[in-house]
Amino acid sequence: MKKGERIKVLVALVEERSPLVVKEYQDKLTNRLKDLMENIDVDPQRIAMEAALIADRGCVDEEITRLKSHLMQLSDILNEGGQVGRKLDFLVQEMNRESNTIASKANDIRIVQATIELKSEIEKIREQIQNLE
């Protein structure tokens, strides 16, 4: 279950980093607009709307919640024993799907790096499952 623990750490990193991306984007957008429009006031409301749009497009809360659920299921399945190969294979497929979605939505290099490592750990679990069947 060491790989599961590593996945938990990576999911927590993505969860922690995700809200910061929006704030950083908002700050970057504000500074860029101020540079472009030196003598014109920038409407903070408009910047907030732009940041909200980016936040909505890049929101990975649902994917994080599902990944956490999958990790709990992974632990439960492993603890129940018996013939678990197919269940685990399906579960790992779902985990991979969630991490792919996070990676595609990510507008942040640290989140992308974490999802690459996350996918690598999931792949290692998948390889171990192949040996069970």
Image (cartoon, rainbow, N blue to C red):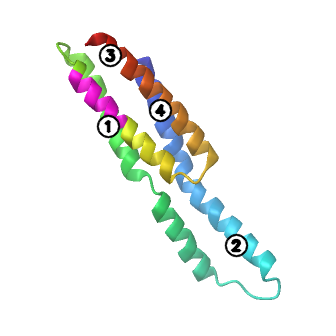
Front-lying residue, 10 or 94: 94
Which residue bears the numbered disc 3?
Answer: 130
Which amino acid does the dot numbered 2 rest on?
A: Thr
Which residue bears the numbered disc 4?
Answer: 119
Horizontal side, residue 125 vs residue 37: left or right? left
If you read the primary sequence from the N terminus, does the residue marked by circle 4 or circle 3 appear first? Answer: 4
Which residue bears the numbered disc 1?
Answer: 94
Task: For marks 4 and 3, give the CA distance.
Answer: 16 Å
Secondary structure under tag 2 reads helix
Q: How many other residues sit within 10 Å of disc 3, few (<14), some (14-19) or many (≥20)?
A: few
Residue at 44 percent of width and 18 percent of height: 2
Closer to the camera: disc 3 or disc 2? 3
Task: For marks 2 and 4, give the CA distance.
Answer: 34 Å
Which amino acid does the dot numbered 4 rest on?
A: Lys
If you read the primary sequence from the N terminus, does the residue marked by circle 1 or circle 2 appear first? Answer: 2
Which residue bears the numbered disc 2?
Answer: 30
Which amino acid does the dot numbered 3 rest on?
A: Gln
Q: Which residues are magenta?
A: 86-95
Which quadrant: the C terminus?
top left
Residue 129: where, in percent of width, then height? 32, 17
The majority secondary structure of the magenta stretch comes to helix
Picture layout, residue 57 above or below residue 108: below
Task: For marks 1 and 3, give the CA distance.
Answer: 16 Å
